[in-house]
Image (cartoon, grey):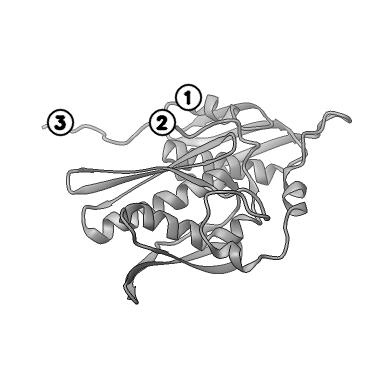
Amino acid sequence: MSTTDSRHIPDIPDLERLIQGIHDVTGCRIKTDSEGDIAEIHVTAVSDRSGRIIARDVDTLLNVKAGLDLDHRKIGVAVTQPEAGEAPEAEIPEAKSRVEAPKPDQLIIEDEAVETGERPIIRRVGVSHEDNLVHAQVTLTLPDQQAVGESSDADTPSGHIGALIRATLEAVLILYDTKIRFSDPQFRIVTLGNEEIFLVYLSAVEGRNVHSFTGSAIIRQDSRQTAVMATLGALNRVMGLWARRSGMDYDIL
């Protein structure tokens, strides 16, 4: 009886082209081992950003776009400073300049810009079902940017909502340049007065720091969009502190 190797072998030229689409990256070469797995990724860039930041962009892109979870030590970046007068726009200082003291009304979920910066607009929320799995897809937009987050879970009521929340978080991480990483979300529906309220609790780690976020939204008609709105509400303030990932010249479609 013969067996078939079901491992997914990545298309190396496609991955190299994908990485070369990152802002400031000028070249990429991927080396594989005898089994076709990625052994090393060598990237060259002309940038005033550090090699560590560019390597994180590469890692995030491969994880989101290609589903690859690589050891970050496999990614090497050689950075050359831009010549005088040709330095790219500094995105992070610009983000800092717009940070102001949060106001109480900034906790309200809005689909428009507030003082600390643009907030994502929910463009589409979709789910599909196959083989006892639910597949969630959440499309968020910022001016001139679009990101699609995807996640799958068991086709149960809780799995349905969990997939939507994780898909929302994935889309957020595509749009913003942040090192934060989220653990599995927790959520609950409670009744207050005559309204059903969707509550979400997010736990995350950023370096050595652990963060917690909570968000809520009143369930009106579509409970799927309510879960997405509550998740964005939990991150409403902190998104105003993050720089947009505008330096990455690709759309997740």
166 over 202 or under it: above or below:
above
Sequence order check, earlier mark of 3 and 1: 3
Q: CA distance from mark 2 to mark 1?
A: 8 Å
Screen quadrant of the C terminus: top left
Q: Name the element at disc 1.
A: helix
**Mark 3 = which residue?**
2
Instruction: Judge depth for marks 3 and 2 and give the one in front.
Output: 2
| Residue 121 position within the rendered picture, expressed as x and y whole percent measured from the top left | 50, 45
Q: Which residue is at 22% across, 48% downward?
A: 133
Q: Nearer the viewer, residue 210 or 227?
A: 227
Circle 2: residue type: Pro
Question: Mark 2 sits on what residue?
Answer: 10
Q: CA distance from mark 3 to mark 2?
A: 23 Å
Q: Which residue is outermost to the right?
A: 84
Label at residue 14 = 1
Please name the amino acid that badge 1 sits on: Asp
Under mark 3, the amino acid is: Ser
Q: Is residue 205 left or right of residue 10?
A: right
